Amino acid sequence: MASLFKDLAKISAYRDRRFPGTQEEFEEALLKSTTVYVGNMSFYTTEEQVYELFSRAGEIKKIVMGLDKNTKTPCGFSFIMYYSRDDAEDTVKYISGTILDDRPIRVDFDWGFQEGRQWGRGRSGGQVRDEYRTDYDPVIRRGGYGKLVQKE
Ligand code: GTA
């Protein structure tokens, strides 16, 4: 068990609080999954651009763009489903940290996509992490809601 935890620590630091299972099942899913999560994306990046970059690692089964649950527009994340585990691993190794639309994207292993996970979970409809950003970026018109959320 100890080695699994060690591997997992390298695999992902993220824990999905809405995963419908035990910690052990979550870890098992992460180690087998062919799905990756992509974060820190521009709101203006299109599915075509995502396809163009991520198909370099292997054949893609499906792309799901993360959407603001109120506006239904992209809010900075997506899920990529590959056919093969090796391709998902290559994506985490080689595509994470590369620049897409002027932003260094972060690729993380994911336990698997389920209907509903495409929506931002923040109270304002977007991603939770954007609500805690205190730095407003005028170019991408994002962040800076942190103070508002913290005041509530
Ligand atoms: N595989 O890293 C990830 C990941 N993230 C960040 C989100 N998702 C991820 N999946 C993987 N790896 O389906 C998935 C979620 C969901 C969708 C949208 O993307 O499973 P969300 O970002 O809107 O909401 O998710 P989520 O994940 O429920 O929010 P959470 O876990 O509270 O926080 C996300 C990030 O916000 C944290 O990593 C942290 O950096 C930041 N954050 C949260 N709370 C605070 C706080 N109090 N202060 C500062 N930062 C905070």
Image (cartoon, grey):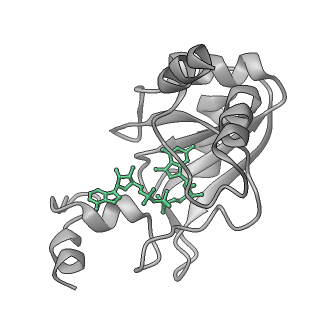
Q: Residue at x 48, y 25 (%)?
A: 9
Residue 116 lies in quadrant: bottom right
Vertical comparison of 38 with 99: above or below: below
Front-lying residue, 16 or 77: 16
Q: Is residue 8 visible?
A: yes
Q: Residue 43: which quarter of the image?
A: bottom left
Q: Is residue 56 visible?
A: no
Q: Position of residue 71 (x, y in %)?
A: 52, 80
- Please report the residue visible at 40 percent of the width from the left and 41 percent of the height from the top: 101
Quadrant of the image containing the N terminus = top right
Placement of 59 over or under 105, stated as above or below: above
Image label count: 0
The x, y position of residue 26, in whole percent, is 67, 42
Residue at (63% x, 50% y) in the render: 47
Depth check: give the residue in front, 122 or 52.
122
**Residue depicted at x 15% and y 58%:** 135
Looking at this view, is 47 or 4 the one in front?
4
Query: Where does the C terminus fall, quadrant-wise?
Result: bottom left
* Side (left or right) of 110 relative to 84: left
128 vs 114, left or right, is left
Is 124 above or below relative to 144? below
The picture places residue 69, in percent across and down from the top left corner, at 56, 77
* Nearest to the observer: residue 115 or residue 4: 4
Q: Residue furthest front?
A: 1
Q: Horizontally, is 52 left or right of 6 in the view?
A: right
The x, y position of residue 113, in whole percent, is 73, 51
Image-quarter location of ligand 1? bottom left
